[in-house]
Image (cartoon, rainbow, N blue to C red):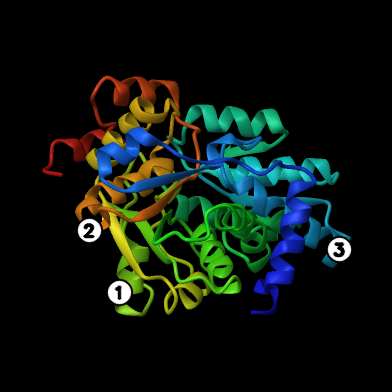
Amino acid sequence: MDDFTLTSLRAAADLVHAQVPPTPQYAWPLLAARTGCEVWVKHENHTPTGAFKVRGAITYIDWLTRAHPEVRGIITATRGNHGQAQVRAATAAGISATIIVPHGNALEKNAAMRAFGATLIEHGQDFDSAKAEAMSRAAQYGLYMVPAYHDQLVRGVASYGLELFDAVPDLDTVYVPVGCGSGLCGTIAVRDALGLRTKVVGVVSAHVDGAKQSFEQGRLVGTESAWTFADGVAVCTPVQAALNYFGPRADRFVAVTDDEVAEAVRIYWQDTHNLAEGAGAVALAALMQEKEAMRGKKVAVILSGGNCDMTQAAEILAGGTPDVRPAHLRTKAS
């Protein structure tokens, strides 16, 4: 794609860096001791919204205001980080933002979106139903529907890949959380633009593994429910455009359980004193699952966000795993 040339990606990074400083990548010695490999953590929990999505919103809203100067308001669906990023960028550009979230969404993410200036509406039980409602309201009220995946989002998100690969170009493997796919596609785009041989691995929840199944079967495969506390990767139906890009380019996918993700959150706290949200910890959970295969190698994990509700954080750090399923499902075997 023309938008994913190195020149274009560096121009997008310049646009991002005008608003958001580069985030650090650190090689943590306790993680190395735990895994048997050199582990670099890309700290996307250190952005102004606490997650990587802030990058793509900057490039997307910049494109939107130039391509559609008539737009006065946007609408989008989110579990939180995408919404915070879009509201922040839209408000800065003088555009109103309406956000649709599913019922039961993280309270502190909802509060953050409202604080950035969003009109926030709860609808449905998962991301996909919230997305359908957002599309309906876009048509009804003349709002511009911002998708969760778009080339202009990927260009901005790719800036974290540029920062990481510029700092550590000789990585063997990078583990990337996958929701709708902008992070995975952005990382791959930078890897390819730089001509590197690093393996890029997508990571999903074992409970919502549509992207993994789609990658392995070469066609869109959805899941029926999205019950995982790693809400940033709780996407039932993958995005075809994302699959078209990462399908032939990703190395493989790994699925991790909620118990593995909760343990990864605790490991991050013990070894780095960073608090990861569920989706932010899935990459480390995947590395822990594959640590024997990674022994002696140089590896990176994307800590994609740190927006964890305090109640969930307390439960996880006390040794538990949050169960976000409705009460009637909790009596059934997991």
Question: What amino acid is found at the position of numbered circle 3 in the picture?
Answer: Arg
Label placed on residue 216: 1
* Residue drawn at the location 35% of the way across and 72% of the way down: 214
* Residue drawn at the location 43% of the way across and 51% of the way down: 300
Quadrant housing residue 49: top right
Q: First in sequence, mark 3 or 1: give its number.
A: 3
Residue 89 x %, y %: 75, 45
Q: Which residue is mark 2?
A: 293
* Residue drawn at the location 57% of the way across and 46% of the way down: 52
Q: Secondary structure at mark 1?
A: helix
Q: Nearer the viewer, mark 3 or mark 1?
A: 1
Question: What amino acid is found at the position of numbered circle 1 in the picture?
Answer: Glu
Q: First in sequence, mark 2 or 3: give its number.
A: 3
How far apart marks 3 and 1 lie (CA) works out to 38 Å
How far apart marks 2 and 3 lie (CA) works out to 47 Å
Q: Which residue is mark 3?
A: 66
Quadrant housing residue 119: top right
Q: Residues within 10 Å of mark 2 (few under 14, many from 20)?
A: few
